Amino acid sequence: MTDNQQITGGQAVVRALLEHGVDTLFGLPGAQTYALFDALYEQGDRIRYIGARHEQGAAYMAFGYARSTGRSAVYSVVPGPGVLNTGAALATAYGANSPLLCLTGQIPSAAIGRGRGHLHELPDQLATLRSITKWADRINHPAEAPGKVAEAFSRMRSDRPRPVALEIPWDILTMQAEVPALAAAPAKTTPEPEPQQLAAAAKQIKRAQQPMIMVGGGAMDAGAEILELARLIQAPVVPFRSGRGIVGNDSPFGLTCAEGYRLWPGTDLLIGIGTRLELPTMRWMNMPDDMPVIRIDIDEEEMQRLPVDIGLVGDAAITTRLLLEALSTSAPKRDSRENEFTAVKESVQKDIQRIQPQMDYLGAIRDVLPRDGIFVDELCQAGYASWFGFPVYEPRTFISCGYQGTLGYGFNTALGVKVAHPDKPVVAITGDGGFLFGIQELATAVQYRIGLVTIVFNNNAYGNVRRDQQNKFNGHVFGSDLHNPDFMQLVESFGAAAWRADSPRALRDVLKQAMDHNGPAVIEVPIEKDSEASPWDFIMPGTY
């Protein structure tokens, strides 16, 4: 693009997206965004478009794209009800630290704030967006588009990645103006910890006899450094959901949350890397007051949210490498604990086999899914069990929604994962209740030939709610039983392939067929109501 060329606001936004390497946009067009979508049309296949059947689906697909790649993802919807329909996905991306750009329209500029009841008007859309994003702003003139888009990408990629939003009034998208060229903005400088803090951390680690490393999504790109640290100080590496695969479960040092809990009583130092430390502070509920804590996190505010002994503010990989350097000159050689870790892992693996039938079904999936295949969980009984019962070997191959616990996120998110990884097998699991939150996106999967395999565990209930009502509210089952359609007929009516598997062995066989199928596929697994063992003893020990 030459300087000062006359183009529309929509063209200016799309060209700015291209400057920032955007290759895919998820969305659903409408009146206020016609000019944006017309600009996308002009670019041909330079930006691939995936059209959703519901705004929520578009946003969750973008979340899946970002969550599984670490790259920025973009979606576009109309303002008002359109953008509100994406609120759950934005909140999920915020909680899961995923770089997502919401591009939404706005009513005509002259009508903003007047409360006249213009089509899709909200009292204050920017205020709404700012409550669930890291940053939100408005493009008030086509000439502002390059700079505002660059600012959006800088904000969502810098420090702690999180979603951002831009709104563009209807008339600004259609307005023609001279728009200067502007290069993509680099991310802001990453902070590095102070040398004295590194020295203090190294000193604390040397004193510890049985340290434990906990990791979260903020450490996703620091696996090599964390494993090196674990070997040096002979510490287990324990994730919850978001940190799974940073150190693989096939390593003696890569433990699940259930396995880590067995080692927790003897732990004398906790090192948290890119994690909120949800396990010891909210799940295990028995963190000693005098437990020394070292945290590595790029978000300085985390050090105030949970007071620590030593806080190292910086990128997880860079800071762990600096800590290794601080330890390398004087770290005492430690006796190997690998046999201890292996014994704990074997013991826990035997114990969790009582979580049936979930464990057998998860085992069947793991047998078929390749090592680098991607598994997307959901808020269902098999999903909860997968947090500790599904082996994960590589980063970004286990996708979860983090602490938001957004029921129904999984299927739509997994479509975005598969769009981002067309050559990798992607398997989504879901319950019957969650699947019906977004089943309309089967039409999107068929239209765009998104070869996702989805396994629907159908117990005709919101299973966790039903169990809690039975166990904690005197058996007063209310609102948790479901009437479902014939999933096989419904799936086939969309044009997708459908199978049913009534045992783990059958699932193993059918899953192989579904993964070889050239297109979207759904496998229904009928589950007898109330037959699933509770997984919560291994997630919140002593509280269920």
Image (spheres, helix red, strand yellow):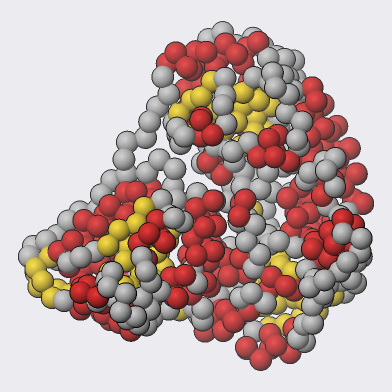
- Left or right of 96, for residue 171: left
Task: Give me the residue at 51% from left, 78% from top.
Answer: 54
Q: Is residue 267 above or below residue 514?
A: above
- Left or right of 464, for residue 199: left
* Residue 171 spot, x, y in % from top left: 21, 77
What quarter of the picture does the N terminus occupy?
A: bottom left
Q: Is residue 498 above or below residue 404?
A: below
* Residue 490 spot, x, y in % from top left: 70, 88
Q: Is residue 440 visible?
A: yes
* Residue 313 spot, x, y in % from top left: 45, 29
Q: Nearer the viewer, residue 83 or 538?
A: 83
- Left or right of 138, for residue 268: right
Q: Nearer the viewer, residue 250 or 419?
A: 419
Q: Is residue 103 visible?
A: no
Q: How many marks?
A: 0
Task: Give me the residue at 63% from left, 79% from top.
Answer: 439
**Residue 173, located in which quarter of the rendered image?**
bottom left
Q: Nearer the viewer, residue 59 or 449?
A: 59
**Residue 216, located in which quarter of the rendered image?**
top right
